[in-house]
Image (cartoon, rainbow, N blue to C red):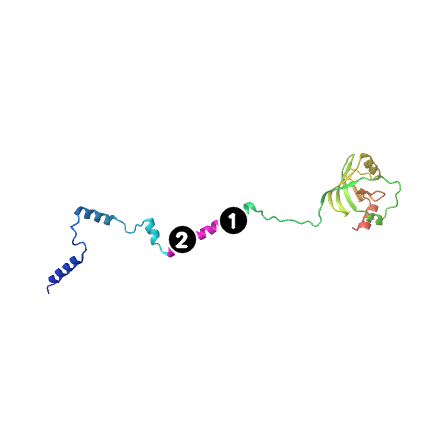
C-alpha cells in the first residue's frame, strides 16, 4: 500500500493550521542564536520571584513552623538568662527561734548598806541572770562573755557600764577580775547586789538553780 498521498494530505493540513505559515522565513543567524540559548539554559534554574510564587502552601507552613520553634527557643534562652542575672537565687533563710543579741547593757549599782540574806525567791524576780567570764575591766565598763543565761534574752556579750565612781563601788561589792567566772543578776537594767551577784561558788550556783532551774 502506498501511503504517500496520505502523507502529502497531512502536510497540507499542518501547513494550513500553522499560524506562522504566511510569515517570511526566519533569519538563519537568529534561529541559530535562539537554539544556542535554548540548549545552554538550565530549565531548573528559577528566579527568586518564580521560586516564591511556585512554592506550595505546605512549604510555607513548614517554614512558619520552623520560625515558631526557633523563636520559642530564643525566648526560652533569653528568659533563663534574665532569671539567672536578675533574680536571686532563691536563698535559704534561717528563722532563729532564740535570737542572740550582740550586747546586753547593764548599769552599775552602788552598794547598799542594808542587805538581807539572799533567797531563791528574791533571785527569781530578777529580769536578767547569767553565768559568764570577765573579758575586760576598764574605768567605765566591765565586759563579760556569757556561757549560760538563766533569765533574759541571750547575748554574745554583757557590758556593765557606769561612771568610774559608781563602777568602783560595784567592784567593791562584786570584785570583777579578768578571766574569772561570775554569776550576775539584774533588774530594771541595773546589776543586783546584796549576794545576788558574785563569783561562781557552790552556794551561789545552788541558789541560781533553785531560782531558775538547771
Residue 46 lies left or right of residue 113; in this view the side is left
Q: Residue 92, which numbered label?
A: none
**In the rendered image, is residue 166 in sight?**
yes
Identify the secondary structure beneath mark 2: helix
Residue 212 position (above or below residue 137) = below
Query: Label 1: which residue?
Result: 79
**In the rendered image, is residue 206 in sight?**
no
Identify the secondary structure beneath mark 1: helix
Dot 2: within a 10 Å radius of its alpha carbon, few (fewer than 14), some, or many (20 or more) residues?
few
62 or 179: nearer the viewer: 62
Residue at the spot 80% in from the left edge and 34% down from the top edge: 164
Dot 1: within a 10 Å radius of its alpha carbon, few (fewer than 14), some, or many (20 or more) residues?
few
CB within 8 Å, label 2 to label 1: no
Residue 122 lies left or right of residue 97; in this view the side is right
Number of numbered labels in the structure image = 2
Question: Is-magenta flag for residue 135?
Answer: no
Counting residues from the start of the chain, the first of labels 2 and 1 encountered is: 2
- Structural distance between the alpha carbons of marks 2 and 1: 24 Å
Q: Position of residue 57 (x, y in %)?
A: 37, 56
Find residue 158 and report its image quarter: top right
Residue at the spot 49% in from the left edge and 49% down from the top edge: 75
Query: Label 2: which residue?
Result: 63
Report the predominant secondary structure element of the magenta stretch: helix
Q: Position of residue 43 (x, y in %)?
A: 28, 51
Question: Is-magenta flag for residue 76?
Answer: yes
Residue at the spot 17% in from the left edge and 47% down from the top edge: 28
Find residue 103 and report its image quarter: top right
121 or 51: nearer the viewer: 51
Q: Position of residue 19 (x, y in %)?
A: 19, 55
Residue at the spot 73% in from the left edge and 44% down from the top edge: 155
Q: Which residues are magenta?
A: 57-79
Q: Quadrant of the N terminus?
A: bottom left
Amino acid at each position: 500500500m502506498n501511503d504517500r498521498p496520505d502523507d502529502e494530505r497531512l502536510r497540507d493540513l499542518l501547513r494550513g493550521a500553522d499560524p506562522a505559515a504566511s510569515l517570511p522565513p526566519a533569519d538563519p543567524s537568529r534561529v541559530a542564536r535562539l537554539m544556542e540559548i535554548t540548549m545552554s539554559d538550565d530549565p531548573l534554574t528559577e528566579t527568586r520571584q518564580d521560586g516564591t510564587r511556585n512554592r506550595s502552601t505546605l512549604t510555607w507552613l513548614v517554614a512558619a513552623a520552623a520560625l515558631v520553634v526557633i523563636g520559642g527557643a530564643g525566648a526560652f534562652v533569653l528568659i533563663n538568662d534574665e532569671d539567672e542575672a536578675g533574680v536571686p537565687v532563691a536563698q535559704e533563710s534561717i528563722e532563729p527561734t532564740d535570737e542572740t543579741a550582740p550586747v546586753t547593757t547593764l548599769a552599775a549599782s552602788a552598794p547598799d548598806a542594808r542587805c538581807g540574806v539572799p533567797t531563791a525567791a528574791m533571785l527569781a524576780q530578777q529580769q536578767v541572770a547569767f553565768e559568764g567570764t570577765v573579758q575586760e575591766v576598764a574605768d567605765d565598763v566591765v565586759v563579760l562573755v556569757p556561757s549560760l543565761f538563766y533569765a533574759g534574752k541571750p547575748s554574745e556579750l554583757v557590758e556593765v557600764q557606769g561612771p568610774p565612781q559608781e563602777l568602783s563601788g560595784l567592784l567593791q561589792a562584786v570584785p570583777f577580775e579578768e578571766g574569772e567566772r561570775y554569776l550576775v543578776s539584774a533588774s530594771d537594767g541595773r546589776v543586783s547586789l546584796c549576794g545576788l551577784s558574785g563569783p561562781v561558788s557552790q552556794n551561789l550556783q545552788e541558789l541560781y538553780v533553785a531560782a531558775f532551774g538547771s
